[in-house]
Every structure is written in C-alpha cells, then in structure tokens.
Amino acid sequence: MKLLIVALLLASPVWAVSLEEARREAPANHPSVGAARSAVDAARARLRMAKAGRMPQLGFSGLSKAGLSGAMNGLDPIGLANSPFFRNFAAGANIAHPGFDFGRTRSNIAVEQHRMSAAEADLAAAEAEVLLRVETAYFTALDARAAQRAATSLVAGREAAARQAQAFYEAELRSKVDFGAAEAQLAAARARLAAAAEESAAAHARLAYAMGAAPEDLSAPDEPETEERYAETLDALIARAYGQRPDLHALQARRDAAQAVLSLAQAQRKPWFRVLFTGGWARFNPLQLSNLTALGVGLSMPLLTFGATEGAVEEAEALLDRAERCLEEAQQLAALETRLAFYAFRAAREKLPLRERQAELSGEAARLARARYREQLASLVELAQAESNLAAAQAAALAARYAVRKTLAELRHAVGEMHAAASAAP
C-alpha cells in the first residue's frame, strides 16, 4: 500500500500555473477557439467576395478555330471571341459591370456582413465557454489538491495513533483489539489518500484538457486572490446578460442576416441591367474599329417563374420568423441561467463561513480527543471519530471556498462578463 501511495504521489504533476495565465493561454491554445477563428476568416472571405459583386470585372478570352465559328460555342467564348464573323482567331479583353440590380448586391453584402458578425460572436462565445471550463477545472484541481493534503494529514494522524496504540499494547495498558483497530483505521486512511491522489491527477488532466495543453506542460495551480463580490441586483444582472452575452449577439446577427436574405429574395422579382465592353483583335475583313470593340447593356426581368420567386420569398420569411423565435428563446434561457447562477453563488457564499466554523470546531475537538487519548481518558474509537470529523470538515470548508469561486465564474459567464474580459485581454 505504501508503494502505491508513493507511486501516485510521484505521478502527480508538480505544477506552477496561475489563474491569470490559464485565462490567457486557454483561448490561444484550445482547438474549439481555433475552429471558431477559422469560421470568422471564412466569413470575412465571403464578405469580400460579396463586395466584389458591385465592382467591374476584367477578363480575357481568346479562341482559335477551323470551320464555322458558331460550332465553337461549347468552349464558352466571351466578348470578341464570341463573334461569328472573325476568321480563325480572335482575342480580347472584357470588362463587365453589374450595372443596376435593384438591391441584389447590396442585400447580398448585408447578408455576409451579418453572418460575419455572427461568426465573430460565435468566436467570443467559444472563448467564454473555454474560460468557464478553465476556471471550473482550475478550482476543481485546487479542491482535489486540498483533499489530497487533508488525506495526507489524516494518514499522519492515524500513524501516530497506531504507534501510540502499539506502545500501549506493549506496555499492557491497552488490549490488542485497540492496536488492531488502529492498524485497520490506518489502512483505511491510506486507501483514502490513494484515492485522493488519483483524483488530484485526474483533475490535473481535466485542467490541461480545458486549456488545450498536455498534462505534463502544466504545474500546480496557485491559490488566486479573492475576487470582488457582486453588489448588483438580479434584475440588473439579467439586463446585463441581454446586452453582453455573445450567444445572444450571434442570434441577433443571424436574425439580421435572415432579414437581409428576405430583402435579397424580394429583389429577385425586379429587373437587372448589366453592362459589358469587349475589345481586342481578330482577322476581320475589312479590319475596322467597329469590328474590334463592342459595348452593350443587357436587361433581364423575371416574368413568370411558376412560384419559384414567390417560394424563395416565403422561405426567407419563414427563416426570419424562426430566427426571431430562436432569439426570444435564447433570451429566456439567458435569464434562467443568470437566475440559477445568482442563486447558486449566493448560497455558496452563505455556506462558506458556516463550513469554516465547522472546521474550526472540529479541529478543537480533534485536539482534545488526542490529548484525552494520550492520557488514556478516551478510547481509540473516540479519537478516530474526531479525526474523521476533522478531515471531513476541512474538506467541506475547502470545497465551500472553491464552490464560491466556481459559482462566481458561472455567474460571470451567465451575464456575459467572462466574454467581455476575454475580449479585453491582450
């Protein structure tokens, strides 16, 4: 058993990471945040393509043929090369302008702008989610390490009690039953220490995963300074959640994108003017400027689409309604999460002094039990019960302290403050 405990303790990492370092490094390393950044890059590229739709496009086309020119339309020639009157070869530059499309391009750009805003909000939400996981794992690791220390202290106390029981037995002051009971309690304490060491190593692994790092790259978390307490009312926190939460920002952007998609679908009912200029060289006979350049304006207008355009508008309207309802549901969920986090934080803060007082009283009782046992005024059962109560009370006090910090992190996440802190970080 001793070898097992030593092996687990040696396997436990010797860390040195602060909460500030964890907050800073996790968004930079975690794969989910990297994926969200890639989504922002893709949205930015789509916006760039949409903006290019209102600019003239310059291209080149050439065609060499033998036989009838009209037979070459399978090559999709554009501009001068599309003329049926050249001889054998033609090449030219083509300038196409979207002209006036009655809001199609403008609506398309608006769609991509709102989608990029949604992707940026998704990135902020991913960062906030990672920070919440990191803080929760961080304080869980601290809790597990404290539990391991408490278990180590319990083993030391049980070893001292076992030595004393052995001395009493050898001096014929106590029976062998007390000595055997002391050995059994020591074995139970060592098993508890082994479990605590295993849980500490597992908590370290979970913290490393939350940070997007390898377990061997981290060290024991430092005890952070006490953070300020919330003095705001619940209604004020809910109002802040509506204005700060990135998931709500993402849904608002998607709602606006759905509105732009509806405008784009409605624009498909309108005409479209396009402009094309082409100029180059071809073996015309006679060779004249009018044979080498061309300028045209095209008009297209939907007349009868058999419900295709109307269906696109109806679909866009339904998607807009769905986006608005999703936003409304998310706002209700944000209010619920803020309420639950507020209640949990308030309860954890109220429990902390009670647990600390319990640990203090249990410590006094354990000291008295040890003194009474040394003077043979108390039984080993009384001493063991007092030490067990002390270990449980110390563990509960530490767990209550870290519960305050974890519930505070959950409250900050619920109101969107964690996202604001991540955005303000360098």
Image (cartoon, rainbow, N blue to C red):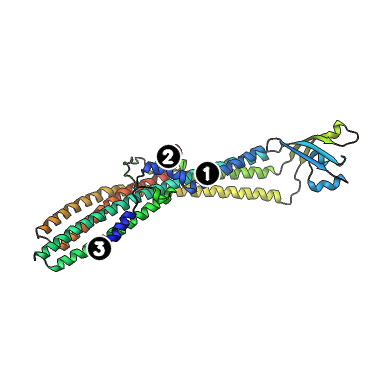
**Label drawn at residue 188:** 3
109 on left or right of 205: right
Discs 3/1, front? 3
Binning the other alpha carbons within 10 Å of mark 3 as few (below 14), some (14 to 19) or many (20 upward) gives some
Q: Earlier in the sequence, mark 3 or mark 2?
A: 3
- What residue appears at the point 59 percent right and 45 percent down from the top-left corner? 258
33 on left or right of 260: left
Q: What kind of residue is marked 2? A: Ala
Q: Could you tell me which secondary element the residue under label 1 belongs to?
A: helix
Q: Could you tell me which secondary element the residue under label 2 belongs to?
A: helix
Q: Where in the figure is residue 385, as x and y percent of width and height? A: 19, 60
Binning the other alpha carbons within 10 Å of mark 1 as few (below 14), some (14 to 19) or many (20 upward) gives some
**Label drawn at residue 37:** 1
Q: What kind of residue is marked 3? A: Ala
In the rendered image, the quadrant that contains the N terminus is bottom left
Label 3 and label 2: CA atoms lie apart by 45 Å
Q: Earlier in the sequence, mark 2 or mark 1?
A: 1
Q: Which residue is mark 2?
A: 421
276 on left or right of 189: right
Q: Where in the figure is residue 156, as x and y percent of width and height? A: 21, 56
Binning the other alpha carbons within 10 Å of mark 2 as few (below 14), some (14 to 19) or many (20 upward) gives some
Give the total number of marks visible in the rendering.
3
- What residue appears at the point 38 percent right and 41 percent down from the top-left corner? 20
